[in-house]
Amino acid sequence: MSKLSDELRERIEQDIATGVLGPGTHLDEAELAERFDVSRTPIREAISMLAGEGLVEIRPRRGAVVVQITPQRLFEMFEVMAELEAMCARLAARRINDKELIQLQAAHDACRKAAASADTDAYFYANENFHRLIYTCSRNTFLTEEAAALQRKLRPYRRLQLRVKNRLQKSFDEHQSVLDALAAHEEQKAATLLRNHVLVQGERFADLLASLAQMETQ
C-alpha cells in the first residue's frame, strides 16, 4: 500500500469516527476520488485497509459500506474493550515511569482544557491520546496492538458517548482517578477504575443508543 492510500485511510477513518460518514453509508470510490483530488486506485486501497480494520464491509452489488453494529454486538465490543484497557492499566501501574507520568499528565491537562470549553471534538482527540498512552505504558506490544485495533473500531461510538450531557466532565473526573492510581502504582485500583470508565451499560448504554439513533436520522 502507498503512503497516499494510508493517508486517505486515515482521513476517511476520521470521517467515520466523527459521524461525517455514518453507519450504513455507501463509500462511492468516484465521489471520494473527486473529493480528495486523487485517482480511484489509492481510494480503493484505503477502503480495503478500512475493511481489514472492520470499519467498512464490502457487500455484493453495493460495494463498500460503513459498518453498522447491532446493539448486542456493540455491548460485547465495549465489554471486551473494558477488559483490555483494565489489563493495560494494571500493567501500566506496575511499569510506568516518571517521564511517562508527565506525558500522561499533559494529556490529562488537554482533556481538562477541552472539557472546560465544552469542545467535544477536542476532548475526543485528547481522550484518545490519554488512553493510548496507558496502552503504551503497559509495555506489552501485543496487548497495545489489540487494544488499539478494537479502539479504532469503536471510535465512532466512543465519540457519540461524549455528546451525552455532562459526560465530558464526568469522563475527565474518571481520568483523574485513573491517573492518581497509576501514579501511586496501585495496580488493581487502576484496572478497576479504567474498566468502569470504559464499560458501557445501563443508562450509559441507553444514552449511547439514543445518540446513535439520532445520528442515523440526520
Image: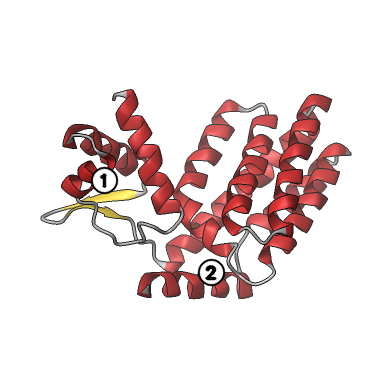
Q: Residue 134 location in percent, x, y? A: 68, 37
Task: Look at label 2 and name its amino acid.
Answer: Leu
At 40% from the left edge and 51% from the top edge, which residue is drawn? 15
Compared to 84, does 212 lie above or below?
below
Residue, disc 1? 35
Q: Is residue 203 left or right of residue 149?
A: right
Tag 1 near tag 2, CB within 8 Å: no
Q: Nearer the viewer, residue 113 or 208?
A: 113
At 63% from the left edge and 40% from the top edge, which residue is drawn? 129
Q: Residue 162 location in percent, x, y? A: 60, 62
At 35% from the left edge and 61% from the top edge, which residue is drawn? 23
Q: Is residue 208 left or right of residue 130?
A: left
Q: Secondary structure at mark 1?
A: helix
Does the image show residue 185? no
- Considering the image in quadrants, where does the C terminus appear? bottom left
Q: Which mark is residue 73?
A: none
Q: Is residue 89 left or right of residue 28?
A: right
At 30% from the left edge and 62% from the top edge, which residue is drawn? 24
Q: Secondary structure at mark 2?
A: helix
Compared to 203, does 102 lie above or below?
above
Q: Nearer the viewer, residue 196 or 111?
A: 111
Task: Look at label 1 and name its amino acid.
Answer: Arg
- In space, the residues marked 1 and 2 are separated at their CA atoms by 31 Å
Residue, disc 2? 208
Q: Nearer the viewer, residue 113 or 200?
A: 113
